[in-house]
Amino acid sequence: MCKADGPETKKAKTGIAATLARPNILALHPYRCARDDYSEGILLDANENAIGPTSLPTNDIPQNDNHLVLERYPCPYQIPLKEAYAKYRGGGIGAKNIFVGVGSDEAIDLLMRIFCKPGEDMIMTTPPTYGMYKVSANVNDVGIVEVPLTPDFDLRIPEMLEAVTNKVKLMFVCSPGNPTCKAIPLSDVITLAESSYKGIIVVDEAYVDFSKEESAIKLIQEYPNIVVLQTLSKAFGLAGIRCGFAMGREDVIQLMNNVKAPYNVNKLTSEVAVNAMKNTDVLAKNVQTLLEQRDIVAKELEAMKDIVVKVYPSDANFLLVRLTKLSKEIYKKMADSGIVVRYRGSELHCEECLRITIGTADENKAFLALLKKTFEELSA
Ligand SMILES: Cc1ncc(COP(=O)(O)O)c(C=O)c1O
């Protein structure tokens, strides 16, 4: 089981690291996940796909032309994977428009390294949003301009455009949002792309397969200032292989490929990812199952009038739920009892909120039962 044992999530205060490291690194608050505290049981905390993977690696080591040749480095270019992904996603993109990385987290970091001068340039984010934008910005000594979403989790476009300066090189638009679960309409992305803003709009579509809103990929042909991030970690059920994509105009993607480590995507990952592109019918079936489960869980939660104030509408594989009270205590007690969700009550506009990944039918039932029981015990 994966449990943080301390040092990697703590700041270095003493020793050679503390005397030599860059000040922004010493000040860093590393990314924290619920799994730093709880890593066993029913895991509904990280928006993975509990149904399972859409593909597997080749399970043998044949000594013929097709074997994986693991003693050799992988191909730095990953053309077959890019071609298969471009074909699957459509929108007029080709292999030259795709960067493949170690999850979309690698792309987030690379974009900042490429476009933001440390100590000088900035990114814009719209809290509440995905925590890695801030962590990557801090690692790269890049400032952050925050323009909060409305309490209904819509972009405030006039305020965003007012807050940009020529130092803001990247604007992160998370759609569907994490933790908001709400998709941003493509028309908003177009408004930003056509505005006076001179930087790049990064549309993070980690959860796009669960949404009715179309992908922004189709805008890339028209707008040179849009980059779209996607991942195999969510709908494809392949968080364990670490494979994500950035898609944009050739000039941007070329820079990403120039800056990445040469062999960033390993052969096992690329094998499974290419196989996944052959199994998109499994993907569609699993997404459908999760969407049905999402509706069931949302309805059950809405019926718990004493416990739940609001279930936010969801375009993703998770729900954001506001409880009447005691959300943090409930989160902790449930995790101690073996069901881990994510406490989001400290995020802007998310007071008393839990974020719940939709699991299998059995997991969801167990979650709903434990939520009821825990609430009753804590309220007694
Ligand atoms: C909005 C968003 N973007 C990106 C990621 C990172 O995905 P990956 O596993 O591809 O690094 C996540 C993961 O939770 C996410 O929620």
Image (cartoon, rainbow, N blue to C red):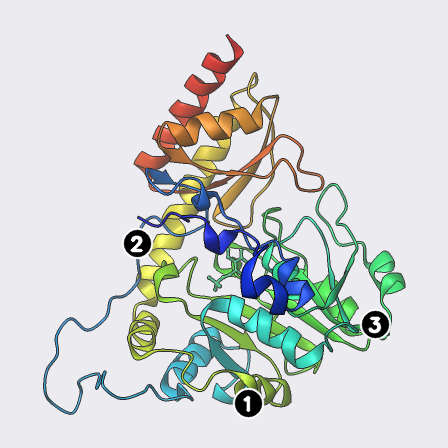
Lower position in the chain sequence, tag 1 or tag 3: 3
Which residue in the protein does label 3 denote? 195
Name the outermost residue toward the top: 380
Nearer the observer, 21 or 93: 21
Q: Which mark is residue 258?
A: 1
Is residue 227 visible to the viewer in this orientation of the structure? Answer: yes
Q: Position of residue 148 (x, y in %)?
A: 77, 50
**Which amino acid is tagged 3?**
Ser
Q: Are marks 2 and 3 in contact (CB under 8 Å)?
A: no
The residue positioned 78% from the left and 73% from the top of the image is 121
Which residue in the protein does label 2 denote? 52
**As drawn, 233 above or below 329:** below
Q: Secondary structure at mark 3?
A: loop
**Viewer-side label of 1, 3:** 1
Q: Position of residue 317 (x, y in %)?
A: 47, 48
- Near mark 2 (Cα within 10 A), the count class, few <14, some 14-19 or many ≥20, is some
Is residue 174 visible to the viewer in this orientation of the structure? Answer: no
In space, the residues marked 2 and 3 are separated at their CA atoms by 41 Å
Hey, which quadrant is residue 36 in on the image?
top left
The residue positioned 46% from the left and 80% from the top of the image is 86
**As drawn, 293 above or below 236:** above
**Which amino acid is tagged 1?**
Asn
- Near mark 1 (Cα within 10 A), the count class, few <14, some 14-19 or many ≥20, is few
Q: Position of residue 168 (x, y in %)?
A: 79, 71
